[in-house]
Amino acid sequence: MSRIDWEESYSVNNEEIDNQHKTWIAIYNELDKTMLQGDLKEIDNITAGSLQKMQDYARYHFSFEEEFMQKIKYPDLVNHRRIHKDFDTEIYNYYRAMLDGQLVLNTKIIKLIRNWLIDHILQEDKKYRLFLEKHSNQT
Ligand SMILES: [Fe+2]
Ligand SMILES: [Fe+2]
């Protein structure tokens, strides 16, 4: 129900980054599916694992994207990097709380992650696409 389907409007006009976003969305969809169909006995292990997988992939993607923004001399890199870091901390906190048994993955968290992913790609990541388009028109 809350799975994400890739849409052309998500594109940042960079094939590698688009592919990374697609992979990241696939990891999210896996998490969402586990939540919907998971065996309650196994759900803690599975979701902690999926959350860790999401964090690992997010870190890989963030550093790739930050390097890319550095390369194109994107002026708002510091702010964008801070937003990435905040997300990383948030996921890490959920993951820790789950391992400590203080938190069970619920639809509210799934929804937060879902909204973050879509909003971030459509708003923040889109900004460097626009910057690049503007910049390449000038040269
Ligand atoms: Fe980003
Ligand atoms: Fe991104």
Image (spheres, rainbow, N blue to C red):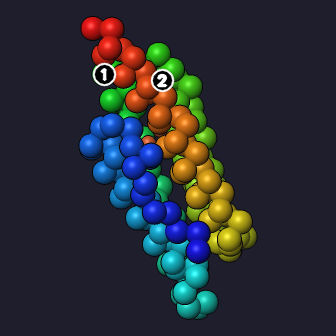
- Which residue is nearer to you in this view: 80 or 127? 127
Q: Residues within 10 Å of mark 1 (few under 14, many from 20)?
A: few
C-alpha distance separating marks 1 and 2: 11 Å
The secondary element bearing badge 2 is classed as: helix
- Which residue is nearer to you in this view: 18 or 24? 18
Q: Amino acid at mark 1?
A: Lys
**Which residue was labeled with disc 1?**
71
Q: Contact, CB < 8 Å: mark 1 with mark 2?
A: no
Residue at 43 percent across and 54 percent down: it is 7
Q: Which mark is residue 82?
A: none
Q: Is residue 48 visible?
A: no
Q: Position of residue 86 (x, y in %)?
A: 60, 41
Q: Position of residue 60 (x, y in %)?
A: 36, 47
Q: Residues within 10 Å of mark 2 (few under 14, many from 20)?
A: some
From the viewer's perspective, is residue 90 above or below residue 44? above
From the viewer's perspective, is residue 19 above or below residue 33? above
User: For residue 47, which quarter of the picture?
Assistant: bottom right
Q: Earlier in the sequence, mark 1 or mark 2?
A: 1
Quarter of the figure that contains the N terminus:
bottom right
Residue at 52 percent across and 79 percent down: it is 34
**Which residue was labeled with disc 2?**
77
Residue at 38 percent across and 26 percent down: it is 69
User: For residue 13, which quarter of the picture?
Assistant: top left
Q: Position of residue 108 (x, y in %)?
A: 71, 66
Residue at 36 percent across and 58 percent down: it is 23
